[in-house]
Amino acid sequence: MKRLWPGWLLCVLTAGLLAYMFYVKAPDISGLVGGMKIPDQLPLGYDMDGARALFMAFVSDHAISLGKNRPSASEAYVLLHAGYDLVFPPMLTASLGFLAFAALYRLRQPIQTPRMAAIGFGLVLALAFTYLACDFIENSVADAMFGPKALELAFNEQFVFVLQVLTRGKFASAGLALGLIAALWVWRWTNTLKADPPLTEA
C-alpha cells in the first residue's frame, strides 16, 4: 500500500475540502439568506416553492448588500462555484476511482481480478464521471437561477426541475459509487482472510 500514498493523500485533501465547504463556506452563504440551505447541500434538491423562496431570499440579500457595500450571498454563491466547487468535483471523481482501484490492488499476489470485481470497478468509474457531469452542470444551472444577473429578472420556473434532477443525480451517483467501493473492500478483506488463514498451534 506504500506505493498508493499519493492516492490516499488525494482522498484526505478531498475530505478536507468537502468539510471546509460544508461547514464554513456554505453556512456563510446560508446565513445571508435567512438560514436557507443552498442547493448543493440538499440531496433531494428544492421543489418549486422552495426554489422560489430561495430566489426571493437571494434578491432580498442582494438589495441589502448594495446599501451596505458588501458582497451579496448571490455573488458569494457564484464565487464558490468558480473556486472551491470548481476544484472539488474532479478531486472527488479521482478519489472515488482511486478507492476502487486500491481495493483491487495486490502487489504481493498478482492474481487475475474476478469478473464481478472488475465489473464493480467499471461501474464505480462510470458513476464517478456521472457525478462529475451532474455537479458541473448543476453549478451552471444554479448560477443561471441565483446569480447576480439572474436576480434582475423574473424567477425562472423552467430551471427548477432541471436543477432538482441534477442535484439528485449528483448525490445518487456519488452514493452508489461509495456503496460499490465498500463492497469491493469487503470482497478484498474476505479474500485476504481466505488466502492467509490464521496460524494454529501444532
Image (spheres, rainbow, N blue to C red):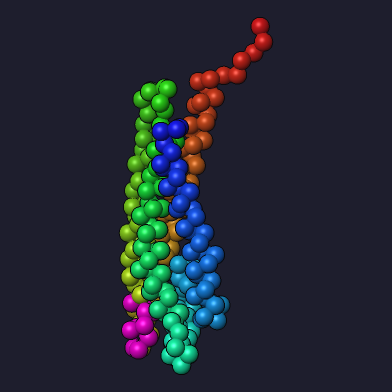
Q: Is residue 180 visible?
A: no
Residue at x 39%, y 53% (from the top left corner):
91
Residue at x 57%, y 19% (from the top left corner):
197
Can you say whether 148 is above or below 201 in the image?
below
Of the 4 image quadrants, the one containing the N terminus is top left
Q: Which residues are magenta?
A: 144-153
Q: Position of residue 105 (x, y in %)?
A: 41, 32
**Magenta segment: does it hold 152?**
yes
Q: Residue furthest front?
A: 69
Q: Position of residue 186 (x, y in %)?
A: 51, 35
Q: Position of residue 139 (x, y in %)?
A: 36, 68
Main secondary structure type of the part rendered in magenta: helix
**Magenta segment: does it hold 187?**
no
Q: Position of residue 82 (x, y in %)?
A: 35, 68
Q: In the picture, residue 166 is in which quadrant?
A: bottom left
Residue at x 42%, y 79% (from the top left corner):
74
Residue at x 40%, y 58% (from the top left corner):
88
Q: Residue furthest right?
A: 201
Q: Is residue 54 visible?
A: yes
Is residue 82 left or right of 49 when viewed as pictured?
left
Can you say whether 126 is above or below 159 in the image?
above
